[in-house]
Amino acid sequence: MRKLFVVLTCTSAAGILGFSAIGASAQSTAPATAVSAPPPVAAPVAAPSPADTQAIAGKVTLAEGSDVGLKFAQDLSSKTANEGDSVELVLDQDLVVNNVVVARAGSKAVGEVTHAKKAGMMGKGGELNIRLNYLKTGDVRILLRGSKGREGDDKTGTAVALTVLFGPIGLIKHGKDIDIKQGTPLKAYVAQDIALPAAPPAPAPAS
């Protein structure tokens, strides 16, 4: 009598079991080849954050709204100024972020006269407005504005009103015109976040 052997097999990945019968002569079939486990999949690497990228690149972020102390590098008067005139200023002190100097004292800043009117008749005082444009450090321009907070959708170029008497930078009334002397301080603000490298060392004083 021919003997039958019942073999239990798995027919699908879902674990469904099946039965089959084979003859005695099938006992000599080749052994099944072992299936190796698939290699482990490496976990995805998270993209570096902007802060990490800046740290790697040796940069720090100067935040929007940061104070920037300037001073006038020229005399300016409502009596002689004209709309569109360039205004030269300089950085009063080193600009520091996280103990890193990003702009050296003396770096140049640029503004523009947006309105000028000399003193008139009937005791009317002079008027003078300037717009702050940027501070330059190395080859980078740091955009500036004249107020700490945003005004509407305009992030840059907010006009700074220099009033005749006891204005925000302590102007002195002189013949009802506005006279700004070289060296007069003026506070500006950073208009938008900007990543900056460390400023180069200050040049050694001439011997």
Image (cartoon, rainbow, N blue to C red):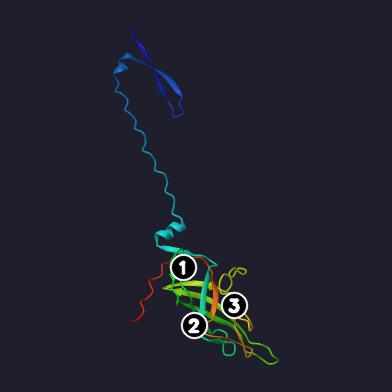
Rounded to the nearest whole Å, what is the CA distance between mark 1 and mark 2? 21 Å
Q: Give the residue type at disc 3.
A: Val
Q: Nearer the viewer, residue 160 or 39?
A: 160
On screen, 34 above or below 73?
A: above
Kindly identify the residue that appears in the image at 32 percent across and 14 percent down.
24
Quadrant in which the C terminus appears: bottom left
In the image as oriented, which residue stretches furthest toward the top?
1
On screen, 126 above or below 150?
A: below
Q: Nearer the viewer, residue 20 or 119?
A: 119
Chain-order first, disc 3 or disc 2: 2
Mark drawn on residue 96? 1
Q: Give the residue type at disc 2.
A: Ala
Rounded to the nearest whole Å, what is the CA distance between mark 3 and mark 2? 17 Å
The x and y percentages for residue 136 are 46, 75
The x and y percentages for residue 191 are 54, 69
Mark drawn on residue 73? 2
Dividing the picture into quarters, in which one does residue 1 lie?
Answer: top left
Rounded to the nearest whole Å, what is the CA distance between mark 1 and mark 3? 24 Å
Report the residue marked by disc 3. 160
Kindly identify the residue that appears in the image at 57 percent across and 69 percent down.
155
- Judging from the image, what secondary structure is the residue with disc 2 in? loop
